[in-house]
Structure formats: C-alpha cells, structure tokens
Amino acid sequence: MKIAIFDTHKFEKSYFETANQQPRAHSSTPHRITWLDARLNSQTARLAVGHDAVGSFVNDRVDAETCSQLAALGVRLIALRCAGTNHVDLQAARLHKLQVVRVPEYSPHAVAEHAVALLLTLNRKIHRAHNRVREMNFSLDGLVGFDLYKKTVGVIGVGRIGQVFAQIMSGFGTEVLLFDPQTPTAFAAKVGARVTSLEELLQRSDVISLHCPLNEQTRHMLDAQRFYQMKPGAMIVNTGRGALIETRALIQALKSGRLGGAALDVYEEEAGVFFEDLSERGVNDDQLARLLTFPNVLITSHQAFLTHEALTAIAQTTLQSLDEFESGRPLSSPAFTSR
Ligand code: NAI
C-alpha cells in the first residue's frame, strides 16, 4: 500500500523503516511510505494524493473537512500512530467510508514511567539541582521536597497506563486512591488501592495524576472549582491530554499558591509548539509562557511515549494494520467498529 505519513519526526523514521523491511504475519511486501513534515489538516490533506492511506499523529486535526478531502482523493485508511483519537472526527470518517486504525497499546510502561519521572523530578527539584550544579552552585537552599512514602496519590483514569502508574506508586509505599467510571475494584484489591469518588480523591490526594482520555466529558475536568476542591499544596501530573486541564484555572491555582506544583507532558494548546524547535523565535502563547515562569512547573514536550519499546510497537502495529487492510482481513486495532 502507499501511505503518506504526516507530521513525520526523525525519532520514528528508522523504526518504521526497520519494521517495513521485516517479514510480518500477513505480508512480506514492504509498503511504500512517503514522509511528510506537514501536520495533517484541511489545508494539507491534498498532499495525500495518490496514496491509499495516511499516517496521522497527535497534533493533526482530522476534522470533517479533512476527512471529506481525503476520501475525495481516494484515501481509504487513516492510521493513527497513537492511542488517543481525540484529534479525529470519527463520525465524519465513518460517513466518508474511511477506516481508522490506532495503536491501542504500545507501552503503558513508557507513559507511566514518564509520569513517575516527572513527579520525582518536580518534587525533588532535580531539574533545578542539575542546572545549579552545572554552574558550580552546590547549595541546597530551595531544593526541599517531600517523601512520597505514606503520602496519598490519586489516579484519575485507571486503564492500561493508570494501572501501571498506580502499581509503581503503591511500590513507593503510598496510599493509592483510584477514580474511574469503570470502578476498577478487582485491580484496586490486587495493588492494595482504594476506589473513591472524584471529590474524595481531589480532597485527599497529595499527588494527582491524570490518565483518562480526552472527550466531551473529560474536557477541562480540572477547572477552577476542582482546583479549589484539592488539598492545599497538592501536586498534579498530566500525561493524558492537555485539555483535561483548564489552563487559565491552572495558572490561577499556581499564582494563588494553592497548588503545590504541576508536571505536564501535555498542554491544551500544544499543537504547533510541542515537537518544534522554537529556541530562535520563542513562543507566542502567553499562557504557556506564563506557565514556564513558575519554579514549581515542569513541562516536557509530549514525550511520555518516547521509548525504544513504544516506538517499535507503534511502527509494527501500524504496518500490521496496513497489511490487514490490504488483504481484507479483520482489523486488529480499529478506532471504531464498522456497523
Ligand atoms: P485506556 O483506555 O486503557 O484507559 C483510560 C481509562 O480512563 C479507562 O479505564 C476509562 O474508563 C477511564 N476514563 C474514561 N473517562 C473517565 C473519566 N471521566 N474520569 C476518570 N476516568 C475515565 O487508555 P490508556 O492506554 O491508559 O491511555 C490513557 C490516555 O493517556 C490516552 O487516552 C491518551 O490521551 C494518553 N496518552 C498519552 C501519551 C503521552 O505520550 N503523553 C501516550 C499514550 C496515551
């Protein structure tokens, strides 16, 4: 199949090239890949001309107009190189008879371990200590953190990633509170955690980590009211999706000193900023610029997935989906089930 991969990054290319050359379960023929720098949206969709499929990444905007254009060009498959589908209008895709596949699980460990790395770095101020030591400043003032042991950690969204995160946290000797509409009681019993209401989790947790998908129910789930409900000094970690948090409310909670800190791998308006080198230009986004001024905010550029294992799995699953689609087999990783 011919696939145009949008929003290509240097870090992923070699994984796709390797996986494409390897014999796979249902095919030994390599697919023909066109690598495109542009993000996929209604302005760039026409670049997919002559391709059967497109590869899409987290900050594309695959809206109804983009789907309509792709379908008109003869594209039949959208392959998401990620788990989340929040950047795709799935209904429009279905309407235009575009099949959508995703990578439902590439490495929950990659993301959960990054959340832990963010939490430890922010709490123990490793980022600040590192900068100091590099400048031969070996003083410790301002670097005091807290023991995680015996603290309360709230996990919002207890699916694949949330479960790994909760398990790691329980290894630190913390009390783990879980909130998920699916009520994960069996998992809670397994790791010695407790299922609670969102209210109790917010009120009692010293650390809150977000691991739920972004959808209409979860957009801005942490807003001004929810920040107010949190235990004063609580720390939040977000490796889910940026818009789970209302940025304006986050800034207020940090300004007032009510929130102890925020470790973010995702940001509401990250498209066009994250993954880019803006070191010569700076950022135009005033909210992001404000967040970067807080000493108790730590931001990484949507890199929680960035491990060797995860990139290998993303490439292999995507190519397997192309094989399945080409041979007419049932898709193992559809983003929606065809009626
Ligand atoms: P999953 O589908 O296994 O688990 C999500 C869980 O969230 C489910 O148990 C679901 O019941 C729960 N949930 C749904 N609505 C909720 C709500 N209103 N409140 C609390 N929980 C709710 O998904 P997985 O694989 O654990 O991924 C979670 C999210 O992590 C993805 O949707 C994606 O947005 C994000 N992610 C971020 C990455 C990064 O690099 N930063 C990489 C991969 C995923």
Image: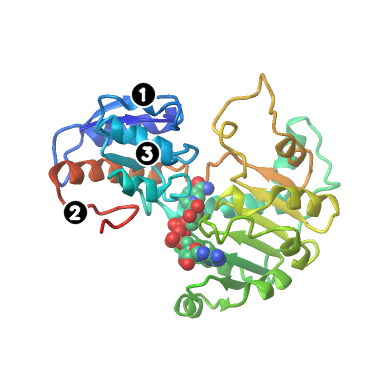
Q: Amino acid at mark 2?
A: Pro
Q: Please state the horizontal and vertical placement of residue 172, each as a whole percent of the image.
A: 60, 66
- Within 8 Å: ligand 1 and the Cβ of disc 2? no
Query: Any mark on residue 191, and which?
Result: none
Q: Please report the residue visible at 35 percent of the width from the left and 48 percent of the height from the top.
A: 102
Residue occupied by mark 3: 67
Q: Please state the horizontal and vertical placement of residue 289, each as a whole percent of the image.
A: 74, 35
- Within 8 Å: ligand 1 and the Cβ of disc 3? no
Above or below, comparing residue 87 to residue 253 in the picture: above
> Which residue is at the front of the view, 272 or 311?
272
What SS does tag 3 mark? helix
Pointers 2 and 1 in contact (C-beta within 8 Å): no
Quarter of the image for the C terminus: give it. bottom left
Looking at this rendering, what residue extends furthest in the top direction? 280
Q: CA distance from mark 1 to mark 3?
A: 13 Å
Using residue 321 as the reference point, say whether residue 9 is left or right of it. right
On the question of residue 157 being in view, the answer is no
Q: Nearer the viewer, mark 3 or mark 2?
A: 3
> Which residue is at the front of the view, 53 or 90?
90
Residue occupied by mark 1: 47
Q: Earlier in the sequence, mark 2 or mark 1?
A: 1
Residue occupied by mark 2: 330
Pointers 3 and 2 in contact (C-beta within 8 Å): no
Within 10 Å of disc 2 (Cα), the crowding (few <14, some 14-19, many 20+) is: few
Q: Amino acid at mark 1?
A: Leu
